[in-house]
Image: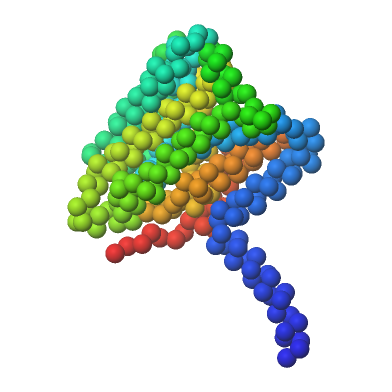
Amino acid sequence: MAMRSTGQPGRSFTGGIKRFVTTNQIGMALVLSVLLFLTNVILSPRSLNINAFGAIFALTIMLTITSAGQTIIIISGGGGIDMSVGAIMSLTALMTVGIMNGRGGYFIPTLFMSVGIGAVIGLVNGTGVAKIGLPPMIVTLCVSNVVTRLQYVFTEGKPSGTASPWFTRSMTNRLFGVIPASIVYGALIFLVVLFILNRSRYGMRLFLTGNNERAAYLNGVRTVWVKITAYVLAGALAGIAGFLGAGYMNFVKCQTFDNYTMKSIIAVVIGGTLLTGGKGSYVGTLVGTLLITVLTNCLAVLNMSQATTDMVMGMVLIVILAIYNRTASVRQ
């Protein structure tokens, strides 16, 4: 009896770790973020400074906003996914700096323009997916290609212009000398999306549709409208992210943010949202974006090429899917 009781704590500890790894996806993402950041500090001690923290915050905020729309779409179910959010970000960022051109007084007009452009592109995506019944990945990938070409049409292959000085300062200045001012924008979007998903009637219908579209329809939910709205919201949020990205980077090139599409998908999956729909949380996505940003920063310290970085991101997505995303959504 004594020998069994002596060995029990070890088995219990090991079992506890195993349960934490396999069941607490958000907690694991936080742990990995800390470990990656510490690895980054070990590899490059100079990265432990206020500017590094500020850059991680700013980049996380932009990715968080883009991933919010991706979260909404994937929760809606039906294999929903948006491959155009990165292209939308790049287009709205280019148009923002092109219109502002270093001048003040254009903040509100360019913000509404970015939201409007993103929403219209999202409407095209949503109509193709929910109304016409085309595969989400095919529709949004084709739209992404069109939007990418529009970037070159708008700039004639020669991007020009900068964000207004006030806008750039609002993105790069530090609150209390540490926290980037851009966190204010991120906090506002976070509260709005959190309300939509967890407190609004639309959020309830979104989860019902993703969980079982047929049952939701039979219970009076306008599932086509719910799905189209999800794509419109995703496009609008990507437009806002591109607008903020223009303020942070000041000068933007064509396809600057196109890689945010894959990053947003990985962040959503890491955060616990099922690709089958019906289950997910924006808080989890927020943690996922933090992990992706820290990982990207760590790879940059190692001087990894973009091709290698994309390969690592793909491997991360496969591993996360293999461990956590095999659970089917509830069916009635």
Q: Point out residue 208 in the picture as x, y percentages from the top left corner.
A: 31, 54
Quadrant of the image containing the N terminus = bottom right
Tell me residue 80's x, y (percent).
36, 44
Total marks drawn? 0
Residue depicted at x 72% and y 84%: 5
Looking at the image, which residue is at 53% across and 31% down? 184
104 shown above or below 210: above
The residue that appears at 56% across and 46% down in the rendered structure is 287
The answer to whether residue 179 is visible is yes
Image color mode: rainbow
- Residue 132, compared with residue 198, is above or below; it is above
Query: Left or right: where does residue 188 sit relative to residue 312?
Result: left
**The one of 296 and 170 positioned closer to us in this rendering:** 170
In the displayed orientation, state which residue is furthest to the front.
Answer: 176
Give the image location of residue 272, x and y in percent.
Answer: 49, 53
Q: Position of residue 56 (x, y in %)?
A: 63, 34
Q: Quadrant of residue 179?
A: top right
Instruction: Point out the residue furthest to the bottom here.
Output: 1
The answer to whether residue 205 is above or below residue 190 is below
Q: Residue at x 42, y 21 (%)?
A: 111
Above or below 65: residue 320: below
Q: Nearer the viewer, residue 197 or 138?
A: 197
> Can you see residue 210?
no
- Position of the C terminus, as image quadrant, is bottom left
